[in-house]
Image (spheres, rainbow, N blue to C red):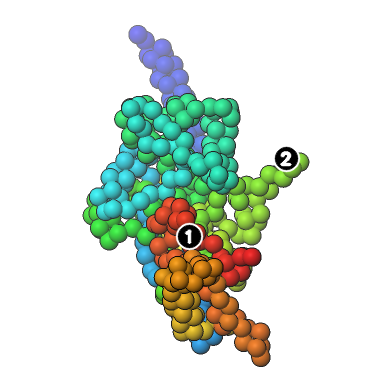
Amino acid sequence: MDRKSLARRLGALIIATAVVMGIFILRLVQFQLVQGEELLEKAQQVSNYLFSIPAARGEIVDEYGRAMASNVSGYNLVINKLMLTGDLNETLVELVEILQAGGDEWNDTMPISAPENGHYEFTAAEDDSRAQSRLDALKENLVKQPYATADQVMAAVVERYELEDYSPEWQRILGGIRYQMELEEFSDNNNFTLAEDVSSRTVATVKERGLTSEGADITETSYRVYADGTLAPHLLGYVGPIYAEDWKVTDEDGNVSYPLKEKGYAMNDTIGQAGLEQVGEDKLRGEDGLKQVTRDKDGVIISTEVIQDPQPGLTMVTTINAYLQKKVYEALENQILNLQATAEQYKGKEASAGAVVVIDVKTGGILACVNYPSYDLNLRSTNAAQYASDPNTPLVDRALRGL
């Protein structure tokens, strides 16, 4: 090869190298100078998520300020979608096993029984309109057929939530929880409360296993308690979860509205369901706070900040005299028991129930409002079936709703 040919090839190589280097330099200039700020902003891009911080509910007190309904602190087991690192179903299995060991219950309102001999049954009582409404919604959401059987509904549950590899028992447990998560609109911005007021054993186990970094979260909250659950249960009323039929309301024309959502409630909130708890709901509920969680483009949470502190609800002062309320109840109970004991002797004076209302004649204020038989408000949720089936109907408010 002669010198001229070698020089031409070397020159071509130099030119090609210069062109390539020129392209790299131009791109570098474009990235650094022309698009530098835009690319830096994208690299630092973050997403902010807002979560509510529940406000403490206002107390209900008697005329002397003695608490009749107040709050105690407790812990909830919550699923945070932003923190989930593994398979959701497997995470739920581990958490449910922890709850079972701690004697805690979990959030599941799906009206289907546990499997028996490979089959399922609907658990919604025919005379319970709320339960029937939940059952109708379940069928519509999953199978679209009002005549579907429990087995058909469960088959749809298994398919939707990919539960084919689990036993029938676990299919029902996981299916019920996953369906509840769907009902409560579980998302990046909406945590799901798996269990409320969990035991100290559950709290310790969740933390010991490091599950708080894998999607589970232990949150401190407050719960409604009644100083004396038997004092005035019908008058005080109670708080309970928001039901699906109250959250999504469809009128006669088929128009859908979300009245509670418009008032600032989340679907997993509690709300006054009866008595003074219901009447004073707007004042007792308080104003929830806000917590902002910031996550970078890789999904890593980089900061958590409380941007609005919760404001507790107002205290409701009643005209009730708690001491008088208790004494009047004791007097009424003694009178009815005495009438029952002497029913054979004094025909026509048999009695199994009664009511007394004591009114301040000067102000018209209600000093005592008593029903017999009564029940313990603190045990209402655990003894609901027993109270409802009692032939003496202790849940009936005879003083205010009787004849």
Residue closest to the eye, 17 or 69: 69
Residue closest to the eye, 183 or 31: 183
Residue that numbered label 2 is attached to: 254
Q: Is 121 located above or below residue 57 in the figure? A: above
Residue closest to the eye, 73 or 38: 73
Crowd band around label 1 with a 10 angstrom C-alpha radius: few (<14), some (14–19), many (20+): some
Tell me the amino acid under the disc marked 1.
Answer: Asn
Tell me the amino acid under the disc marked 2.
Answer: Gly
Residue farthest toward the top in the current orientation of the protein: 1
Taking the spot 58% from the left edge, 82% from the top edge, the residue there is 358
Q: Residue 346 in the image: x percent, y percent?
A: 49, 72
Taking the spot 46% from the left edge, 39% from the top edge, the residue there is 123
Taking the spot 45% from the left edge, 67% from the top edge, the residue there is 344
Q: CA gap, disc 1 to disc 2?
A: 41 Å
Q: Residue 97 in the image: x percent, y percent?
A: 28, 45
Sequence-wise, the earlier of marks 1 and 2 is 2
Name the image quarter holding the N terminus: top left
Quarter of image, res 379: bottom left
Q: Is residue 208 left or right of residue 148?
A: left
Residue that numbered label 1 is attached to: 392
Q: Is 9 located above or below residue 157 in the figure? A: above
Q: Residue 172 in the image: x percent, y percent?
A: 38, 35
Crowd band around label 2 with a 10 angstrom C-alpha radius: few (<14), some (14–19), many (20+): few
Quarter of image, res 250: top right
